[in-house]
Amino acid sequence: MKFSLSNEAVQWYKSELNLQAGDALRFYVQYGGCSTVQKGLSLGIRKDTPVNPACQVTEEGILFFVEEEDEWYFDKHGFSVTYEAGSEAPEFHYEK
């Protein structure tokens, strides 16, 4: 699965979550919210330690990852995270 974060998204997560080099941030499936790939579900985030990452990317010493147990959620879509200045939060994009 292809996975990427824009530099602006990385900076937002660092600032909002006080992330430092050596930290790891997990994207996981949660009930509720909305998504274009799974009805009634959305992605949550939390500081966590990877066990069996399906995909991961390291930016500025911070590991961003999705565990294998959550890979089904993406339904074979690639996943990218962007952030536009002035927005409330980063946006998730799914590409086949």
Image (cartoon, rainbow, N blue to C red):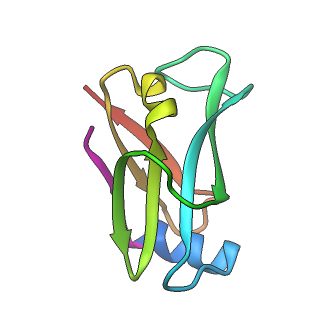
Q: Nearer the viewer, residue 48 or 76?
A: 48
Question: Would you say residue 5 is visible in this rendering?
Answer: no
Residue located 62% across and 31% down the image? 42
Rendered view: 58 above or below 94:
below
Residue 55 on image: x %, y %: 34, 47
Rendered view: 17 above or below 87:
below
Residue 89 on image: x %, y %: 63, 57
Residue located 47% across and 66% down the image? 9
Residue located 40% across and 40% down the image? 93
* Quadrant placement of the N terminus: top left
Residue located 44% across and 22% down the image? 72
Q: How many marks?
A: 0
**Residue 6 colored magenta?**
yes
The residue range painted magenta reads: 1-7
**Residue 61 colored magenta?**
no
* Quadrant placement of the C terminus: top left
Rendered view: 9 above or below 42:
below
Q: Nearer the viewer, residue 62 or 43?
A: 62
Question: Would you say residue 9 is visible in this rendering?
Answer: yes
Report the residue that reaches farthest toward the right: 32
Residue 83 on image: x %, y %: 48, 61
Would you say 25 lies left or right of 55 here? right
Rendered view: 73 above or below 65:
above
Would you say 74 lies left or right of 26 here? left
In which quadrant of the rendered view does residue 95 lie?
A: top left
In which quadrant of the rendered view does residue 68 lie?
A: top left
Residue 19 on image: x %, y %: 60, 79
